[in-house]
Structure formats: C-alpha cells, structure tokens
Amino acid sequence: MTAGTALDRLRAEAAAEERFGRLVSRFHRLGDRALLQFLDELAAERMLRTAIERRLLDYVDRLDPKTLRDLEAHEAAPDAAAPGRRRERRASPGSRTKRDPALGELVRGRG
C-alpha cells in the first residue's frame, strides 16, 4: 500500500466519521419519540433488543447529565456539530467526546 493510498483511506474514514456525527446531531434534534422508534426498529430488524436494553441500562445506571457535563462529554465532538453551528469554546485536549473509549469505560465501571 502506498502512502497516498493510506492517506486517502484515512481522509475517507475521517470524512465518514464527520458525516456520521452530523447525522447523529440532526437525529438528536428529532427528540425522544424518534429515538425510541429507531431503536425499536433496529432491535427488531437485527434481533438485538436484549443487547440494546442491556447497554441502555448500563448507560443510564452509571452516567448522569452532571457527570457528563463535568467531563465535557455531553456533546458530540466539535467536528460533529451541525453545519453552521458555532461552539462557545473548544473542547480541551483531555475532554471526552463522541466515541471516546473513556466514556464507555465509565459505563463499564473501569474509569
């Protein structure tokens, strides 16, 4: 694999992550009912209801909004913000953002 090919792949992955983050931000604005319907359909389609419920319980049992705000983990990463939305301040280098393994570790009790 050439350096150009690897760089192109990394750029494509970064662009895909950014698109996904924007999509999640847009979806979040649809509210609780849309999220419930989405998870219900996903669970039924993939036979994952028990796994989804278990993961949801882990998150709601171990995390709370104050903790997430304290860790600056209550919003998506700056690159995942909706187009045109300006952030008040940049996240600090140590802050927890979307898909940060540390947030998952907090949920699993390892953080």
Image (tube, grey):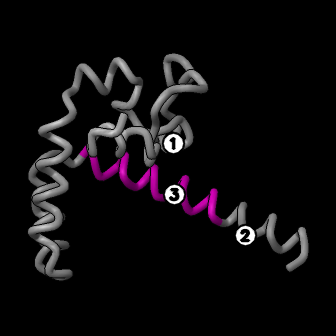
Residue at the spot of label 1: 83
Query: How many C-alpha atoms fall within 10 Å of the one at disc 1: few (<14), some, or many (≥20)?
Result: few
Tell me, yes or no, whether the highlighted magenta stretch contains residue 14.
yes
For the residue pair 65 and 35, the one nearer the viewer reads as: 65
Mark on residue 99?
Answer: none
| Residue drawn at 35 percent across, 45 percent down | 104
Q: Residue at x 29, y 52 (%)?
A: 27
- The residue drawn where x is 50% and y is 27% is 95
Quadrant for the C terminus, please: top left
User: At numbered mark 2, what does the secondary structure look like: helix, strand or loop?
Assistant: helix
Q: Secondary structure at mark 3?
A: helix
Q: In the rendered structure, does residue 91 fall within the stretch colored magenta?
A: no
Q: Earlier in the sequence, mark 1 or mark 3?
A: 3
Q: How many marks?
A: 3
Coordinates of residue 24 in the picture (x, y in percent): 36, 52
Of labels 3 and 2, earlier in sequence is: 2
Give the Cα separation between the discs numbered 2 and 1. Answer: 24 Å
Give the SS element for disc 1. loop
> Where is mark 2, residue-wise?
9
- The residue drawn where x is 63% and y is 64% is 13
Q: Amino acid at mark 3?
A: Arg
Q: Are the residues tagged 2 and 1 within 8 Å (C-beta)?
A: no
Tell me the quarter of the image containing the N terminus. bottom right
Name the quadrant containing residue 6. bottom right
Q: Are marks 3 and 2 in contact (CB under 8 Å)?
A: no
Q: Which residues are magenta?
A: 13-29
- CA gap between label 3 and label 2 equals 15 Å
Q: In which image quadrant can residue 102 be found?
A: top left
Give the labeled residue for mark 3: 19
Rendered location of residue 17, percent (x, y): 54, 57
**Mark 2 vs mark 1: which is more N-terminal?**
2
Asked if 85 appears above or below 8 in the picture, the reply is above
